Amino acid sequence: MSEQFDVVVIGAGPGGYVAAIRAAQLGLKTACVDAFIGKDGKPALGGTCLNIGCIPSKALLDSSKQFHNLTHSFKDHGISADNARIDVPAMIARKDKIVKQFTGGIAMLFKGVKGNPVTAIAGFATLKPGKVISIKGHDGKSAEISAKHVIIAAGSQPIELPFAKFDNKLILDNAGGLDVTEVPKRLGVIGSGVIGLEMGSVWRRLGSEVTILEALPDFLAAADADISKAAAREFKKQGLDIKLGAKVSKAEIKGNEVHLIYSDASGEKSLVVDKLLVAVGRKAATAGLLAEGTGVKLDDRGRIVVDAHCATGVEGVWAIGDCVRGPMLAHKASEEGIAVAELIAGLPGHVNLDTVPWVIYTEPEIAWVGKTEAECKAADIPYKVGSFPFAAIGRAVAMNEPAGLVKVIAHAETDRILGLHMCGANVSEMIHEGVVAMEFNGSADDLARICHAHPTLSEAVHEAALAVDKRAIHKSN
């Protein structure tokens, strides 16, 4: 008979490992099955986010920012450095060290749940009817376990274009983009989303000529238009060549180059690059996950169908994170994992998808929560807007980071905050002021009446909230 658990989590990414830890904390006998293999050829917890996504990309972003500041910005502070150079292998090694530290940290967290450690199992899991999980190990051996509850946290994988197959030598996915061993002279990027902009920024700062080809006519269409415009201006200053309405039809490897054919409003064009990063989005990693007869349904995009509480409709089977509806964000997955573990234990659990913050870790950073102005117009919601530039914030100017703005959107009748949008230095840390306010149905006036420390970047939030009713202090209304 297979071993029985209270909870089996499929996937050890930021949704899965968090769900497993919370379930174990609540006294449930828990196992977590994951198939990821690290660069060293050994099983590695943490999923895409920790191994080849969120954490390693931020390590490279920080390294490249330090180098760019040294070679470009520090002179404004009276700091000079001659003959500065970047050691790319050392930079990659630092990134890998950070990844290893945190993957090992999850293993320690699994062991550290007092009285009920999480059982980690390496292998590819397939859910069978009756909440039986078949596991194919990396050694080719198979085993089965069963559970009272199954939480599917299978994550996502990069979308591959049929004419640009990944080899991670010249045509790269997000993992390949993190392991380039030298600065490419010419880097092409297909897609101007989060991955494309972040990885494009890394290699541009280090000296690459970066061309980003975006098929859509609008830049960062998911963000508020004012924020997108502000970000686009800064990226142009940095030398990122972003071509909108550029639809790629061919990518051919010739020697050590990739030859691209794309078309825009002016016709067909060509581009030759040394490396090509394909970042056109991600899809749910559900292939091979569900055996016949489980009753778990997939939608037309391959995502697992769930209700507002992440229940699949099959008793005791839940799904969270990138493999279900909603934004493909690590923090959203983690909160869903906690909510489901608590629901299983008989506690209340819920995630408000309307207050999940979005962040792009470029320079300047971009962050938002809630509705954009365009979304308010489309939904016929009466609204009012207040905005404030970082160029008028003393701390931002003192930091030599004056780019960007903060924008508050509030309901025209109730003053309830509908959205908070930011482009600027460290806004990834500031966006949560809007998240908290919106979770408690706060108004723009609530934000305006909170005392913000001076001098801080967060004063831009204060002034933008004041500007909603045309009473900003440091701005002509």
Image (cartoon, rainbow, N blue to C red):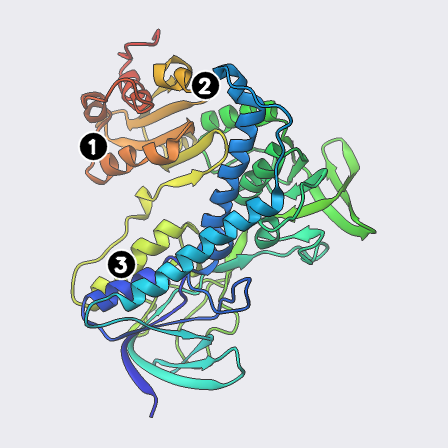
Local SS, label 2: loop
**Cβ atoms at labels 1 and 2 below 8 Å apart:** no
Marks 2 and 3, how far apart at CA: 40 Å
Query: Observer-nearest residue: 146 or 103?
Result: 103
Q: Which residue is most to the bottom?
A: 1
Q: Is residue 466 left or right of residue 249?
A: left
Query: Observer-nearest residue: 86 or 266?
Result: 86
Q: Tell me the kind of residue under disc 2.
A: Asn
**Residue at the image point whose x is 31% and y is 57% from the top:** 336
Report which quarter residue 85 is drawn in: top right
Q: Which residue is most to the front?
A: 82
Report which quarter residue 1 is drawn in: bottom left
- Which residue bears the numbered disc 1? 442
Quadrant of the image containing the C terminus: top left
Residue 372 image point, x, y percent? 40, 33
Query: Observer-nearest residue: 108 or 465?
Result: 108
Residue 191 image point, x, y percent? 60, 43
For the question of whether residue 279 can be seen, the reply is no
- Which residue bears the numbered disc 2? 400
**Residue at the image point whose x is 20% and y is 36% from the top:** 441
Query: Observer-nearest residue: 377 or 428?
Result: 428
Q: Earlier in the sequence, mark 1 or mark 3?
A: 3
Picture mark count: 3
**Which numbered dot is residue 338?**
3
Say which of marks 2 and 3 sits in front: 2
Q: Earlier in the sequence, mark 1 or mark 2?
A: 2
**Cβ atoms at labels 2 and 3 below 8 Å apart:** no
**Residue at the image point whose x is 67% and y is 44% from the top:** 182
Residue 172 image point, x, y percent? 65, 52
**Residue at the image point whose x is 25% and y is 36% from the top:** 438
For the question of whether residue 419 can be seen, the reply is yes
Say which of marks 1 and 3 sits in front: 3
